[in-house]
Image (cartoon, rainbow, N blue to C red):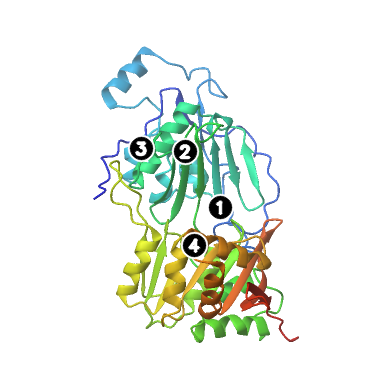
Amino acid sequence: MDVPREVEPFIPTPSLRWAEPPAGPEPESAAPPGGRDGPPGSATRASPGRDAPAVWRPRGVGAAAADTDTDAEHEHEHEHGHAAGRIDFDAILRDQPPPGMPAEAASGPPAPTRSEAMLGPLAGYAADPAVTDLFVNGDAGLWVDRGGGAQRVAAWSLDEAEVRALAVHLVALGGRHVDEATPCVDVRLGDGIRVHAVLPPVSSTGTLLSIRLPEAAGFSLAELAGLGMFDDGMFDDGPRGARLFRAVEEHENILVTGAAGSGKTTLLSALLAEARPVERIVTIEDVAELRIRHPHVVGLEARQANLEGAGRLGLDALLREALRMRPDRLVVGECRGAEIRELLAALNTGHDGGAGTLHANSLADVPARLEALGALAGMSADAVARQTVSAIGLVLHLERRGGARRLAALGHFALDAGGRLTVEPERQPAG
């Protein structure tokens, strides 16, 4: 069994300090709707008293002249385990204000949640409700996405060794390990923060961290309509809106497709929230991200092998276990490998009302993606086609353009004249 090792607190080198960002707001384009408080179309919350979150910065970069090493400071560090003014990570985890935090940072912006505080020097940025993603590219810097694309943070500065130490620490907090033998790892922290780390030499540009921050709460379909994910009038007795509600009510199996960051998880969560309260929803995810407003949701999460190479539990194995849990709705957060075989088999044997997501660039590309995944599971294209047509009743394709996420097309699977899998767009009557 893979038992997480004791995690040492992340304490940066003595050269790192908690400091306020430089005077004046950072250059920032107007972020379109789409922050963590809402998908496309939602307004982001203001953060009174803050232009940017407090950041870590090496001494000497915008620091006061008095901010220098002294014998007294080294003596204090020896006695208390951290340099004066440096964030004490243990204090953060105890929900105590870290020493040295500026008063403005402590009282003005929203305080980081317990999960956000796990991110250490990134906690101030994660607390911004407009931020959806954080990217640390080795010693090249930090990029923040507030819904309008990634923008570089000029005030951020960590060297490669410090970024690597942060990556190792975050992965360990998620109960996994990252090293030269396992250089690419995905973990979930707290209430759904997703952290992906890549170490050199797999990364040719230093240690990479990609952090996806969850929405503050799930959404209903009606709320998504009000926030602009659907066409105008779609939920004003429009035929498309009725189609979505009918798909959930009639237990159709649904596949949500789109590119990365297009809102697949958000829409899938909203669809499942419309299920009847008496239904039992079982989710299977590589890293748990679904946030479903429903009273009876249980989740299974994949597990990485331990240092000895044992203990791995993949999505395919979890799917088999989930079938023994009497699910009314079986949900796979993202199909990306051989688990497509188990999912199609399950949805073809009486488990209606299931759902999943799939990466695809367009509605027309979905069949090719399914055939590729089926090949990984040893399935022929003909087997994938026939099982898919039988198993999945509705395909919803999402797009992200100019920072806005929207439902671009609805379709259903069919076989063409040659027996190959295809998707036929659902053409709705005017209404």
Q: Are marks 3 and 4 in contact (CB under 8 Å)?
A: no
Task: Of the two numbered discs 3 and 1 on the same chain, state the one appearing first in sequence.
Answer: 3
Residue that badge 2 annotates: 103
Q: Position of residue 87 (x, y in %)?
A: 40, 34
Q: Position of residue 71 (x, y in %)?
A: 36, 12
Give the SS element for disc 4. loop
Residue that badge 3 annotates: 89
Q: Which quadrant is the C terminus positioned in? A: bottom right
Q: Position of residue 238 (x, y in %)?
A: 68, 84
CA distance for labels 1 and 4: 19 Å
308 or 258, which is in the foreground?
308
Residue that badge 1 annotates: 132
Give the SS element for disc 1. loop
CA distance for labels 1 and 2: 26 Å
Task: Of the two numbered discs 3 and 4 on the same chain, state the one appearing first in sequence.
Answer: 3
The picture quadrant where one finds residue 331 is bottom left
Task: Of the two numbered discs 1 and 4 on the same chain, state the one appearing first in sequence.
Answer: 1
Give the SS element for disc 2. helix
